[in-house]
Amino acid sequence: DDPKYSAHSLRHTAASLALDLGGDLDAAQQLMRHKDISTTEIYAHRLSKAKNHLEWQISTALFQTTKKKK
């Protein structure tokens, strides 16, 4: 009964991955059998925030400038 592996968390992961791998909201809604697409949009929004944060971290790491001493 580990909450990390609950049916809800596994469904959440599946929906997030479907969207992250390029699936559109309609396809994800059908896959998850959500009655209302607004339920599916919740997953897209959460993923979007996480993705934006990760992109920011990567760009900061790649383009961090250091001043060279002369």
Image (cartoon, helix red, strand yellow):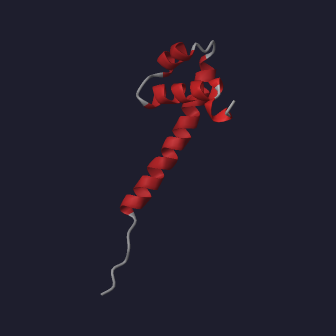
Measured as percent of width and height from the top left, residue 26 is found at 50, 16
Q: Tell me which corner region of the image, top left, top right, bottom left or bottom right, holds residue 34.
A: top right
Examine the rendered structure and indicate whether residue 50 appears above or below residue 19. Answer: below
Which residue is depicted at the point 56% across and 17% down? 32
Say whether residue 43 is left or right of residue 23.
right
- Residue positioned most to the left: 70
Measured as percent of width and height from the top left, residue 42 is found at 61, 29
Measured as percent of width and height from the top left, residue 20 is found at 45, 31
Where, quadrant-wise, is the N terminus in this rendering?
Answer: top right
Which residue is depicted at the point 52% across and 25% down? 14
Measured as percent of width and height from the top left, residue 46 is found at 58, 36
- Residue positioned most to the bottom: 70
Examine the rendered structure and indicate whether residue 4 appears above or below residue 39. Answer: below
Examine the rendered structure and indicate whether residue 62 appears above or below residue 9. Answer: below
Which residue is depicted at the point 63% across and 15% down? 36
- Residue positioned most to the front: 1
Say whether residue 34 is left or right of residue 48.
right
Q: How many numbered tags mark residues here?
A: 0
Where, quadrant-wise, is the C terminus in this rendering?
Answer: bottom left
